[in-house]
Structures are given as C-alpha cells and as structure tokens.
Amino acid sequence: MGKLFAVEIIYRGVFQKTLAKNITRGIVLAARDEGKFGLSFGRYGDSPERNGIPAKSFAIVADDELTLEAGMAQYEPKQVDLTVVLDDTLCKGAESWAWYGLQPVHHALKPGSTLVVVSLQDAPALLKTIHRREEPYKLGVLKGVTSFSGMWVYKDDHTDVRVLGAIAKALPEVVSLKAVEQFITEKLKNALKVTSAKTAYDRFKPMDVKPGEGNPEETFKFEFPGWTNMRQGVSIKGQPQGGPYRDPVSLEVGGFRPARNELFKKYSTRTERPVVNFATCTKCTLCWLNCPDASFDVTPDKTYDANLEACCGCGVCEAVCPVENCITMVNESQFTDNKSQWVAYREDKDAYLKWLEKTIKSAEPVEKRSYGFRYRGQYKEQAEEALEIAQRG
Amino acid sequence: MTTTFVEEKPTQNLEPFKGVKKVPYEEYFTSGHRTCEGCESAQIMRLMAKAAGPRTIVLGATGCMYVANTSYYSTVWGVPWMHTQLGAGGSSALGTAAALRVLMRKGVLKDEPINVIAFCGDGGGADMGLSAISATMTHPDYNLLILLYDNEEYGNTDIQISGTSPYGVNTSFSTPGKVKRIMHHRWKKNVAPLILAGHPTCKYVGTISTSYPLQAMNNIRKALSIGGPTFIHCLNPCPKGWDFDPYIAFELGELAVNTGIWPLYEVENGKLKLHGKTEQIANGRFKRLPVRDYLLKQGRFAHFTEEDIAFFQSKVDEMWEKWLVPGVIPLQKDLEG
Amino acid sequence: MATLTMPVEEVKKVQEQEALITGAEAIAIACKLANVDVVTAYPIRPYDTVMQYMSQLVADGEMDCEFIVAESENSQFEIVKHASVCGARVFCGSSGIGWMYAMEVLTVTPALRVPMVCLVGNRALDDPGAFGVEHNDALAVRDLGWLLNWVDTAQEAFDTALISYRVAEDRRMFVPCAISCDGAFLTHSQALVKIPTAEQVKKFLPRYNRGDLLLHPDNLISVAPQANEDWVMEIRRQNYAVTEHACDVIREVYAEFEKTFGRKYGNPFFEEYMTDDAEVVLFGMGTLSTPVKVAIRKLREQGKKVGFVRLRWFRPFASAEIAKCLERFRAVGVIDRDLSLGAPDLSGVVATEVRSAMYANAKNRPPVLDFICGLGGREVTVPDVEKMTDIVFQAANGKSQPLTQWIGLRG
C-alpha cells in the first residue's frame, strides 16, 4: 500500500469555481508527471453552487492506483494533508449547503499540516478569525489580492500557479516544484507563470500555530433529528412573523425585525458587509426595500440596520443608496463580530462615527478586489495590478 | 340578461401601496435562503409575498427559487408554501384554488378570499409548464396568479438555455466554440403577449422588474384583486448565470428596461398600459439606450463581436419600430389592406 | 374508529337499491356517495367512461364537486394532488399510456402523503396503440408507495372504491390508492350492483381530515423543500413505515365495511375459489377469474381437483397470508396478464412476487409456474385454462415444466 494525499481547496462558490478547478486539476496533472495517480472533484454537497457560498474542491493523489481507491467515492475526505483558502474572509469558517454546521477552515487538516491562505494580511491578523484547535498546524499566507471572477469569464491573474508553487513548498510529497514547473511549461505553455509559481514557492514561509491559538468562538453545530421525530409528508413548520425593535437608550420600542431562518445564517457567505452612517441616513427605505435577503432591521427611529445574521454582502444596498457614503461595503476581514451597528450608534454616536471612518479607511488596502464581471477589459487591468502586488510580495 | 355559468368569487381586493414608505414591514419570505449574493429572483419572491400578505398560499415549481430558497429542513416562507413539479405551475394553482372553492362552498373551510400564487421559472413557465399554464388561464372562475420569474436560463443545473434565453447567450449548452461563436440563435419567447393573445378571458397580464419594486408589488396586488386567473412575467438579473458583480444587479434591471429589451406594461381587461420609461420610449420622450450598455456589463455576452451586438440592437429596434404594438405585439405595422 | 361503525341490527335497515351498471359507473356512484370534492378528467379509453358518468352526475346536480377537464394526464393528476393537500377528497384516473404520462406526479404523491384515489382502466401500453387489457400500466407504480388493488365485478368495484378511500385517508396511511379495472370486461359491460344509501356511506367514510399536513394560511407549513443526502433516507423510511402497517389497516377497514354494509369479503387480500380440497391452484388478478371459474367447474366434473386464488391487493403484497394459502397445494400456476421483460426466469410480475413471498414465508414450497396470457386484451378462454391446469398437474406429478410459458399465442 502506497501513500495517499488529500489537498482541500476552500473557495467562494462560483466566484472562484474555475480557479479552484484549475488548482486541483493542476495538482493531479503535475503529480502525474512524477508517476503518481490522482483525481480531482468538487464537493457534491455544495452543488448547485451559489455566488459567495463557501464551497470545496479536492485533489487526491496516490503513489499507485490501488491506494487511490481509498480516496474515491466520498463527498469530502475526512482528513486532508493540506488546505488552501482562496479568500481570506473564509477564515471565519465555511458553511455549505449540507448540514455540516459551520466548519472551521482547518477542521479536516491533519495535525502539523499546513493551511495556505491567499491574503494581503499577515498570519497573526488572520488568526484573529481562524478558530482555535487542539492540534498544532502551520499557517502560511500567499500574499495576493483575492481572485474573484465568474461563471464564464476567468480572471487569469496567476493565482492558480502561485497556489501550486506554495503547495510544492508545503507538501513536496504531492508535487515538487520541478513537477509544477514542468506542468506549467508543457500544459499551460506560459513562461511568466513558471516565474510566478517559483516566486510563490520561494516566498512561502508558513508559521507554527500552537494548540489553542486563534478565535475562541464556538462554531455553529447541528443536531440531526431521526425519521421518527421528523414531521410527516416532507413538511416543516413555516416562519413566524417578526416583531418590533427595542432602542437600547430610549428603550422605545418600534420599527420591525423579521423572524429569520435560525438554521442558516450567512456569516460565512459574506465577503463584504455594509457599514451604515445612521447620521446621514435619510430614511428613504431603498436599502431595506431592495435587499434580496431581507437583512435590514427597521429601527424605532426608522433608519435601517443591516442584520449580519442575514446579510450575504451583495452590495445592492450601497448601489441603491442615494446618499453619498451613507452605506459603504467593507471587506469582511475587518470584523470579528456580527453585532448591531445601530445599537453601537445609539449607545455612543461619536465613538461609532469615529469607528466607522477608521473602519472604512483601514479596509482600503484589501478593497482592490472586485466581486465579478462589470465591464469588458476589467479582468485584464486587475490581473496586471494583482500580479504586480504579488511580485512586490 | 344572459345567464352565465361562471361563478366568480370575491378576492381580497388589495389596494395599491401608496409610496415606498407605505410598504408594510412584515416579511413572508424572510432571510436565510441559500440564493446567490444579489439574487433578484429571491427579491421578487420577497416582494411577491409582501404584496400578497398573510392570507396566501404559494406553490413553487422546481427551479432556483425552489432548490435554493427552501432547502429542507429549514424554510424562509412565512405563508404556507408547497413545492410542485417543474411543469405544474398552472396545475398546482388550479388544484389549490379548486379545493379552496369547493371546501368553502361545502362549509368545511371558513369562506374567505385566499390568494393563490404559483411561481415558476422560465424553465417551468415558458418551457415545460406552458401547456398547463395555458389551460389554467382558461378557467374564469378560479382566482389565482401565475408569476413567472425569468432569469433567462436553467440556473440550478449549471446554467443552460431556456425558451427565454436571449440570442447568442453563453450557457453550458451554448458555450462559444472554435467554429461556432453563437450556439444559441433563437430569439427570446415573448411570453406575456402569448398568454394575453391566447386567453381572451384572462383579466390581467403584465410584466414587472425587481428594479421597480413598488410598481412590481402594486401590479401583483392588482393581479390578485381583479379575479380569475392572472399572469405576471418578471425579469430577474442573475449574478451567477449572467456573470456579473452582484453589486450591479439592480442597475442591470433598469438597463433592461431603458434599452427597450424589457418593456414594462400591463393589460387589464384588454386595455394596454405601458409603464415608466417604457411608456416614455413608446411616446418618444426617452431615447432608448444602446443595448451594448446592457450586454457589455455581463460575462455571458463577453464573446459578442460588434456584429453580434449590432444584430441584437437591430432586433430590439424592430420591436419598437416595426411592431403593431411597439415592444408588445410582434405583428408588423404595415399590414396588407 | 369504533364510533363510526353502526350496530349490527341497523345493518338490516340499510335501504339498498339495485342497479344495472358498469364497473366504471359503479365507481362514479361510489364517488358521488363519498361526496368527493375535486374530480379531474382527461379522455382515454377505457377508464374515461367513469368520467362520462361523473360529468352527467354533476350536470344533473346529483354530485357537488369541482369537475375539471385537464389538458393532459400530467395536469389531471397534479390538480388533484394539490387539491388533496388542501383538504379535498379527490378522484382521478387514467389508462395505459395516459397513466404513464402522469408518471411524474404518480411518483411524488406517496412521499407527499396524498391519499388520492383513482381508477386505472387497465390497458396495454403503446406501441402499438391498443385498447385491450394488460396490467403493466398500473403495475408501473408498484415500487413507489401506491396502494394497488384489482377488482373483478361491478359490485366489487363499487365496494372497493369506498374501501380505498377509507384505507388511503387513514392517518396511519395517507398514501394514494389505485383501483384497477380490466378494460372492456369491467369498464364497459353492465351488471347488477347493490347501492347503499348516502347515510350509510357517510357513516363508513368520515370527512377526510388532513390535520397538521393541511396547506392553509391557518396551518403555516412548507411542504417538500429540496433535501440533500442528509435527509432523504429518513424521509424514505417514513414512507416505508406506511407499508409496515398497511395490511393491518386494510384488515380493520374490511371489518368496518362488513359491519356497516353487511357484505362479506372474508380475507381482504385475495379470494379463494374451490380451494378446500384442491390439489393444484391457478392464481391471478382481475376479470380473468370468470373464464377460470367456469373452466374449474368443468374440470371438477372430470374429477380434476383444481382451485383458484384471485389476488385483490397487489400492494401491499400480503406475503405471509399468500404463502400460507399456497403452501397447501402440490403446484401453483400463476396467470400473468403482464410482462416483466428480463425478470427472473423471464416470468411476469405476479409470478415473481409470489415466488419471492413463498421463498421466505412458506413451510412447503410447491412448484410455481407462470403463464403469460391474455395480453393486449386477448380473451383468456376456457380451453386456455384447461391447458394451464393440465400443465400445473403435470408439474405437481413431478414432470418438470418450463417456469414460464405463453398461452393462447399463435406460433
């Protein structure tokens, strides 16, 4: 029996679908050049994929075909030798379609193995959101702008080959740098990409994460009922009606807070969140009215508070808001909680507005990312920019 | 005085919402569904449920708004909701309305008007379910609404062509290749007029867009109030299949209208009324934006050449310059005799 | 349920009327007496005679229901499926390929726990188009959770219609039930039928109560959301549970029926004819019982001790009872008015099920031969039956026989 390796790619549904596929295929094809056997597959439980919903794909590599069988016919490997997170906001955990609850990004990672995150932040900053675990592991950042594209048009910013370079560094038993370079040269036929992979390999220096380091938050888990206590006729209880919202200062009760699906919260679906300037809000209702996720609570003073259980970060509210800088989408990695912004505003207006300004500013460095196709030629521009940042390191 | 055997039942007679500030807070399609970021199809579900209110039964044909919205063992529906098969939008509404009617007549259920809405996607409404919807539209004595939410593709199965997919679009059944740049050469079905022209006793047919939410809700309320079977066709930009940044979902809805690609109108008891920009386009008070403004913002058209864009533009121009009822009825103006 | 039954002395007071009607008409009248709420029709021979009678009953004001003529079988069954979920007692039906056109709906109704009752006027499946009887149409749903029964007289059709509603609408069941009537022989020929009063039927059939599964604004539920691999197996198990107690419910309902109407069926699952002293038996479903019974009487005059077992309920398949019944004989000849191409020993559906039931449940396992017979509406004649009986006797006497043979076929 030979050795069996599993590499897991955690990515943003659809936005990074092609990227993830390119990477897992790259691993298998590169490993093949070294005489290994492998397969590449997406987690069926994520299908049909949705924009932004966390998804996973895998590369299984084995010394021989018989060993490979052990890695077949499963939705998701129970243990992996390396995990790559393609969007650093996913460090908060991944909740897929299936009822796994919120999975920490390292939940399948073998002790001592490496977690690779594509990010412009450094490892200690990322550890603020990555959950604690009992076993040690390595955390390595692949410096770079998170690469988002879409269903049909792919943004070729070398993220795929750079990740392959990092993997070659962290897990040479699966693919050596030589194998990666050979794969790129022969299959992708792009000399610049060879350089990108090599640079990523050279620069990739993971740190050790000790047991207990990281975000102490308890992740959401789900208890499955059995067939005897499930409702008959494939039926489930509907959603009750919501109720008013209480002002923490005046204790006035008013506005409205809808009842929400307790079993699916969008904490891990979001790459950005709206931050609201309640002082400039004209109460025009547009953000609330046009939110496909009904994520705005109506406050007693008739402003609109983005409820972060429900917001999936699409940005429509910012797009429709008629007031300059009243609603700003800010990268999710800036936040460690999901508390109500309006409550904070009511408790201390000045402090909130200062926080708001600071948050929007500090978000800027990672604001370089975009969330898909807006116009022709956009990806070419962004790819060049992204590549430059990557080379700078 | 002629006897009619059509027995009309009263409806809830829902008044229009007078302005966005009068829109009720209550949500009957709430947070926690699993649709994409910026899903306008989910948005019309929410607006539809808001417009209809609590005394409503919703039937949902297979499609994105089934698979993504209501994933067992949770739900976001605050009104009774039931799945129906892909081709059964029309039949599910008919069966539900029929049961309510007879059980109220027999005193089994309290006699009250209850809204019955069946929604279906373009796959369920414009393709497989068309036959059943057509039959349902001929039953004058059942009060129900068929709402077709149109994302111009089969969105749940990795994006494939449907009867309402636009010309030339890239889908996983029409991906441009080495020899054929355009694999989908059919023009979008003109569904609302199809229902309108084919079912003379249907009292209300209309088109809406989620980028005009107040009007969308008020049209839904009108359709539910007028009595008999009614039909509404809504265009819903799809960030996933159309391949655009969710941020511009709302803008694309507006662009579809302002380019003249998606006319907004309603036909109430046979009287046509164009809405908003569509009306201004028809009366020359607003110049249609070029379709390229709409097409070039979507990855699904990224393979279009200038020639393709020009062809697309010419077909849309035809709608407005050659059609007997511009943007609506595709009979040529210059009829013989 | 005891409160719904009537003291035995009252049975005598039942004001029965007698009418000369077809099996289809008998079912239409049963639906009228059952106060069915929603009926959907679509034309196809031979089942649709029931809808012709029903539309007349509605036109004459004898029946108060929504009578909807659909634009296809698929819609026909969808409409009643949804009406049933909203609390309506519904009736529907089809034949042959029409039934197959509704297959999508037929597939989803058991999991949705929809107690629709419908008539299948058994008809050969296309191609070629043919009007004659074959059982493959109804049998196509045998694995899906439907209750399936076969009747062989107009009276039994009438009684079984009422029984089917009572069984299907039992809260422990809530699954669809199809009554199979052989095309032509039963749907189109008239016989004398005893018809009880509406009051009696009302006592036997309380209003269908969907309880907490009712789709109505006062019962806020979501029905049949999309489920992934975390749920489907548990959902399937719930439907499996229905089949676990189906036989008990059917026994109870026949007992109630007997108390209410005084008509006895004995064993609900199958009818035995001249089996007490029989050495071999024939086994089959539906109207082929008539020529078989005639032939048996003739054969008995020749001293051949043959009997007949006619299966009433194919789903649930009462394995234990059937095995216990058949283990007494020296050989069994199953008459299949259906095909199951490529099945074990190339036998028909019924023979395969009988053998499977015998294997696990019978103390003694006599040879079970299969006869493919009367396909496409071809008559099963007395000589056919004599031939089959002869073959079964040979098997009983140790002369080996092919497990499956075609009878009444031109070479």
Image (spheres, coloured by chain):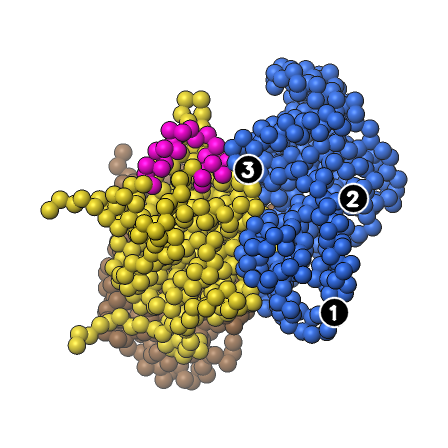
- Which one is nearer the viewer's eye here, A195 or A229? A195
Image-quadrant location for residue C369: top left
Q: Residue A74 got which mark?
A: none
- Residue at 63 percent across and 49 percent down: it is A313
Residue B92 rendering spot, x and y as whole percentages: 41, 59
The secondary structure that dominates the magenta segment is: helix
Instruction: Specify the subunit that label 2 lies on.
Output: A
Magenta segment includes A392: no
- Which one is nearer the viewer's eye here, C183 or B207? B207
Q: Which chain is blue?
A: A
First reached walking from the N terminus: tag 3 or tag 1? 1
The lab-note entry on whether marks 1 and 2 share a chain reads yes
Image-quadrant location for residue B7: bottom left
- Residue at 60 percent across and 48 percent down: it is A314
* Residue that badge 1 annotates: A248
In this picture, residue A108 sits left or right of residue C94: right
Disc 1 to disc 2, C-alpha distance: 31 Å
* Residue that badge 3 annotates: A373
* Residue that badge 2 annotates: A130
Dot 2 falls on a residue whose secondary structure is loop
Relative to C71, residue A151 above or below: above
In the image, which residues are magenta?
B293-316
